[in-house]
Amino acid sequence: MSKNAISNSVIRRLPRYYRFLGELENNGYIRISSRELAEKMGLTASQIRQDFNCFGEFGQQGYGYNVTELKGEIGRILGLDKQTPMILVGAGNLGKALAAHIDFHNRGFDLIGIFDKNPDIIGTRVGDLPVMDISELDEFCSEKKPGAAILCIPRNQAEETAERLLSLGVLAFWNFSHYDLRLSHKDVVVENVHLGDSLTTLSYCLNSINEK
C-alpha cells in the first residue's frame, strides 16, 4: 500500500505500538499474539492486524509476532533508523525543556542548533548546545542543512519564521506556537502541538465522570 493511502489514524498509532513493543522487549517478551497485544493496548486484535497489514506481513500464524523484529520494522517505518538534523527556534522555558528532556536521537532526529533573539538567553547553554542569535540562522542553515525545526515562539511570529526556514531548506515543523501553521507548499510536514488542548480534554473527561 502506498504511504499516501495510509490513514492518519493508523500513522498516529504507530508510535504507540513502538513504545509498547519496547516495553515488552525490556520485560523479556520474545513473541506476542495480536490478541495479547490488543489486550495490553486497549485495542482489538482485528484493528492491530489491519494496521500492520498496511505495511506488509509481520506475523506468523500460530506464532504471533517476534517482539524485537516487529519493533525494528515499525521503527524503520517511522524513520527512526535515520537521524534528520533539527533546530530549535525559541529557547524560553518550553524550548529549553524540550531540548533538555526529549530523546531526539531515538526518535529520528538530531538536535544540532538552538536559536533565540533575547540577549539574556543568547550565549547560554542547553545541554551541549549554545543558544545562538537568530541573526545567525541563515548562515547556520546554509552550512548545516537542517531538515526540521521546532518552533517555540509567539504565535504572531510563527508563519514568518516558518516561511523563512522553508526558504532555507527546512521541510518539517514541530510547532508549539499556539498557531495552526499551514504552509501551502508541496512536501512540507507540519505537526501543530497544542498542550492546552490536551489539558482541556482532560478537564472534559474528569467532569464527565463527576456528572455520572
Image: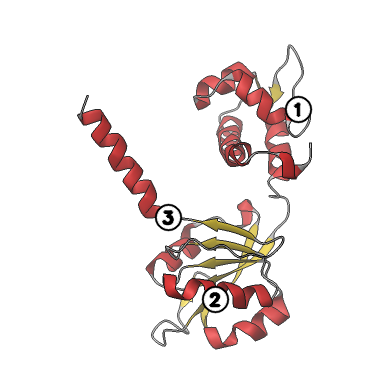
Amino acid type, callout 3: His
Q: Is residue 30 visible?
A: no
**What kind of element bears circle 2?**
helix
Judge the density around disc 3: few (<14), some (14-19), many (≥20) Cα neighbours within 10 Å.
some
Task: Tell me if label 2 and label 1 are in contact, CB under 8 Å.
Answer: no
Position of residue 73 relative to residue 78, above or below, is above
Task: Tell me if label 3 and label 2 are in contact, CB under 8 Å.
Answer: no
Across and down, in percent, residue 44 comes to 56, 20
The residue identified by callout 2 is: 161
User: First in sequence: mark 3 or mark 2?
Assistant: 2
Position of residue 57 relative to residue 180, above or below, is above
Instruction: State the residue in front, 202 or 131.
Output: 202
User: First in sequence: mark 2 or mark 1?
Assistant: 1
Across and down, in percent, residue 33 comes to 64, 18
Residue at 62 percent across and 38 percent down: it is 14
| Marks 3/1: CA–CA distance | 34 Å
User: Looking at the rendered structure, which numbered label has been put on residue 177?
Assistant: none
Question: Of circles 2 and 1, which is in front?
Answer: 2
Amino acid type, callout 1: Phe
**What kind of element bears circle 3?**
loop
User: Looking at the rendered structure, which numbered label has been put on residue 194?
Assistant: 3
- Quadrant assignment for the C terminus: top left
The residue identified by callout 1 is: 58
Q: Is residue 69 visible?
A: yes
- Quadrant assignment for the N terminus: top right
Amino acid type, callout 2: Thr
